[in-house]
Amino acid sequence: MNSPFSLTPRQIVEELDKYIIGQKDAKKNVAIALRNRVRRMMVKSEIQKDIVPNNILMIGSTGVGKTEIARRLAKVAQAPFTKVEASKFTEVGYVGRDVESMVRDLVEQSVHLVREIKNEGVKEKAAEAVEEIILDILIPPVKGAGFRQAPVPAGGEENEPSNDSELNERTRERFREKLRNGDLDDRKIEISVKASSPVGVGMIGNGMMDDASMAGLQDMISGMMPKKTKKRKLSIAEARKVLLEEEVSKLIDFDEVKEEAIRLAENNGIIFIDEIDKIASKSGKNGGGPDVSREGVQRDLLPIVEGSSVNTKYGVINTDHILFIAAGAFHVSKPSDLIPELQGRFPIRVELNSLTQEDFSRILREPKNALTKQYQALFEAEEVFLEFNDESIEEIARLAFLINQEVENIGARRLHTVMSHLLNDFLFDVPDTIEPNSKIMVTKEMVQERLSSLVKNRDLSQYIL
């Protein structure tokens, strides 16, 4: 499947700017990395397979936009994307997730993407089939006669439809119109659906089977078992959804889906490894303890990032051209504490800036999904209109920045805390006390009054164990 992605690096940055404030260097580097993948696919010579992605290491404290950049990048690229936390992995042989599971997760995402695209292509045809199935249930066929005229015999005259058949056809068409208008949505009908037969294989092999092997064995056993159906009584609206899913799956060649998904994941997949600093050995420590395990995870990670073949339940995937973006705060450790081989596989390093008070103010105003807009949408759902004047937004930004400085810097996430304290009482009173069509104006004075306790309590935090 060819990627529809065709944005230039500048256009990619413009798209990221709609959701993320600042961090120009990080945006620029990820935009170039993304566009380079498209450029590689356009290369016609044999060197194409030797062009590998420049993996990126983003360094910055929590809440500055590392994860959001990677997540938005995947949406812009319409590419399979998976986010994993490096701290969840353990060295091979220990209890925990193995590093190959991130690749299997990516393939799952890719299969989901391809299926969605295929589903859209056959949905109209499937909907027609579902309509006929429901009509068959509502208006059973006349025995000995079809719904349409019988075929013309060779050399003979056209047969006149029987009265029963003609009446049946007219009734069917009336019901078809009602069905399309939604007049019959609440009517109950009985349909036959495939019965799901879960196969428990979790304990096979003393519990040592990996996810791909277990899934493959489940698929094999399911394929050998006879397909069972069961009767369900549903409203026509519900039955339409269930039947549509079944009809769509009949029209899609799943082998083709798997092949395209593997190809898409290999060439367009993005794996975001968060908290990579948590598997870096601390500076100045020499062997022993948890540092051994951390280094073990790094060594397990190395072949995946360098390029290797990984078995999944959909087939073997090569990781040579998957783009890896790693991120970490590196408060305790440093990027140089990672093993040299792994450092070499992340040649692009980007340091993200800490957020300023001005950044906080822009975060509240500019992004398409700004917190102020989210809260306005929540209030509008109950027909209450929330407004912020300019001074109130500046005051929210100032207080959030101040608390970050004096307690702990958690970046833009601090705005969630501040906004919650500011507006929770209003949310509690809607719609009991604050009735529909009311208007709430947030002012600087209101912000100061409602957040005064939050600002005072920050001084006590140093005494809390």
Image (cartoon, rainbow, N blue to C red):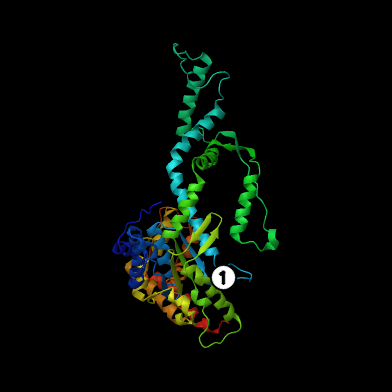
The spot of residue 302 in percent (x, y) is 50, 72
Name the residue at 63% across, 42% down.
195
Is residue 363 shown to the viewer in this render? yes
Q: Quadrant of residue 6?
A: bottom left
What residue occupies the far front of the structure in this picture?
A: 46
The spot of residue 371 in percent (x, y) is 41, 64
Callout 1, which amino acid?
Answer: Phe
Left or right: 292 as drawn, with respect to 308: right
Name the residue tied to disc 1.
Answer: 89
**The C terminus lies in quadrant:** bottom right
Depicted 131 relative to depicted 312: above or below: above
User: Helix, strand, or loop for circle 1?
Assistant: loop
The spot of residue 323 in percent (x, y) is 42, 65
Q: Check disc 1: other Cα within 10 Å, few if <14, some if 14-19, many if 20+.
A: many
Foreground residue among 195 and 459: 195
Depicted 131 relative to depicted 10: above or below: above
Name the residue at 47% across, 53% down.
261
